[in-house]
Image (tube, rainbow, N blue to C red):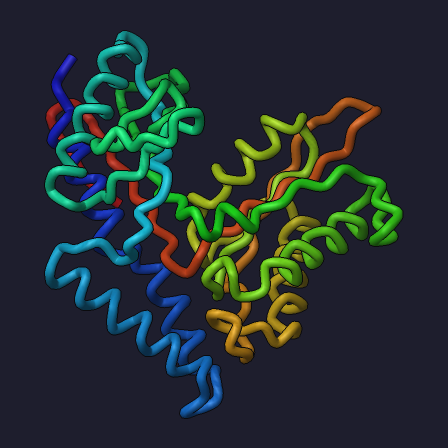
Amino acid sequence: MRDLTQDFVELIRRASTDLSPDVQQSLEKARDVEEKGSAAQSALITILDNVELSRQNSTPICQDTGTPIFYVHYPEGWSTRKLREQIRAAIVEATKKSYLRPNAVDAITDKNTGNNLGDDAFPTIHFEEVEGDTLTADYLMKGGGCENVGAQYSLPNSQLGAGRDLAGVRKVVLDAVQKAQGQGCAPGILGVAIGGDRGSSYYRSKEVLFRKMDDTNPDPELARLEDRLTDEANQMGIGPMGFGGKTTVLGTKMTGMHRLPASYFVSVSYMCWAHRRRRLIVRGEEVSYE
């Protein structure tokens, strides 16, 4: 199999230094709907100016370069062991080039490795074998600030009056947004998984964040709920960076999972405005990025 180390380095560079067009367009729309001269609009103008400078200088959009998370879908015959080695080598090189800030801190000793490598969970790499001859690697940079305000609920929740249905899901998601306030670097994007167990639910709540900002959920009921949650979150008045305003979240992405009868989990992964995600595509000798 071919060595993709440098391709992974380029994937990391693009994600770290250049927002995807759909995310930037969402931020531009948010800027335009905020009151002229308001703190909310000023915050968004500053954000967009920073995005452009980062793109021009190939420097990180945010100083918190977050947890590196990879979802790799690979054809039959590829070695996940070698792919993992290449990704980890790319992480080290990207850190040396300052596309990533050294973030891997041992929770027991409190020592930073200095190269963004920790145990098998840092960076986080998920592998799945697929049919065909195309490898895709989706890469997400999950900042610590927005990760801190993520939440998981077990329904029913008597305190919120949330039952085991989509009406209950709506209540707990809005509760998570209310509690986050400006601490998650709003305006954010909500990734929501309904069902599963505690681990798989959080897994899927991050995976769903790879969806494009302007796409539509194939499940009509979830599509309606996504739009409603976005609208109602934006009526809270929290606004960009918690300064108040019309834009608290840029969008909501949801997915449903099977669950045990005894459990009904709702996991909310909050992504900050610096929604840094990119995709590497390898078809034979051809390499491209999205």
Q: Position of residue 198 (x, y in %)?
A: 65, 29
Q: Quadrant of the N terminus?
A: top left
Residue 110 sits in quarter = top left
Q: Where is residue 123 in the image (x, y as percent from the top left)?
A: 34, 29
Count of numbered badges drawn on the protein = 0
State the residue lying farthest toward the bottom. 37
Residue 47 sits in quarter = bottom left
Q: Where is residue 89 in the image (x, y as percent from the top left)?
A: 17, 24
Residue 124 appears in the figure: no
Residue found 31% across the figure and 38% down from its top:
103
Q: Position of residue 62 (x, y in %)?
A: 29, 57
Residue found 47% across the figure and 70% down from its top:
241
The one of 7 and 119 positioned closer to us in this rendering: 119
Residue found 38% across the figure and 53% down from its top:
275
Residue 206 horizontal side relative to residue 4, left or right: right
Residue 227 appears in the figure: yes
The one of 237 and 31 positioned closer to us in this rendering: 237
Residue 220 horizontal side relative to residue 84, left or right: right
Residue 134 horizontal side relative to residue 268, left or right: left
Residue 267, compared with residue 259, is above or below; it is: below
Q: Quadrant of the C terminus?
A: top left
State the residue lying farthest toward the front. 109
Residue 182, compared with residue 149, is above or below; it is: below
Residue 87, compared with residue 174, is above or below; it is: above
Residue found 46% across the figure and 58% down from its top:
214
